[in-house]
Image: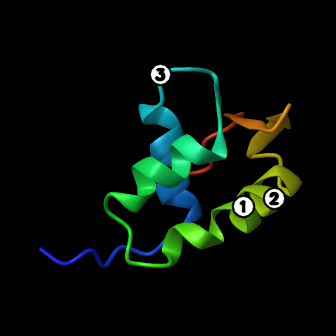
Amino acid sequence: MARVKKLTEKFLVALFKRGKADYLPPSYLKMEGGKVLAPGESDKLLNMLAEMAGKGIVEEKNGEYKLLTDPYA
């Protein structure tokens, strides 16, 4: 099956919920997302995390990110 998923905020929120720790490094999110995202989509991860941090959805601490609120719940 071809990987055709696009990186969205909703997809990132789901990845955070699957994570095993409060704070997750971008490398984990990129690796897990890369398993199902279309080629090149995971390259947009850092920009999207910065946007989400600006909206108060995630928090950045020491280069790792924590989900603060789920706007899709």
The residue type indicated by label 3 comes to Lys
Please name the amino acid that badge 1 sits on.
Leu
Give the Cα distance between marks 3 and 2. Answer: 21 Å
| Residue at screen point 75% across, 67% down | 47
Badge 2: residue crowd in 10 Å (few <14, some 14–19, many ≥20): some
Q: How many angstroms separate mark 1 from mark 2 (CA)?
A: 6 Å
Question: Tag 2 or tag 3, which sits nearer the N-term?
Answer: 3
Write down the quadrant of residue 5 in the picture.
Answer: bottom left
Q: Residue furthest top?
A: 21
Q: Image point 41% across, 78% down: which residue? A: 39
Task: Locate residue 59, reporting x and y percent.
Answer: 81, 38
- The one of 43 and 73 positioned closer to us in this rendering: 43
Q: Is residue 36 left or right of residue 48?
A: left
Sequence-wise first label, 1 or 3: 3
User: Do the residues bearing badges 1 and 2 touch, measured as CB atoms within 8 Å?
Assistant: yes
Q: Is residue 15 above or below residue 7?
A: above
Q: Is residue 1 left or right of residue 58?
A: left
The residue indicated by pointer 1 is 46
Q: Which residue is mark 2?
A: 50
Residue at point 60% right, 71% down?
43
Kind of element beneath mark 2: helix
Q: Which residue is mark 3?
A: 20
Q: Residue furthest left?
A: 1
Location of residue 37 with respect to 55 vertically, above or below: below
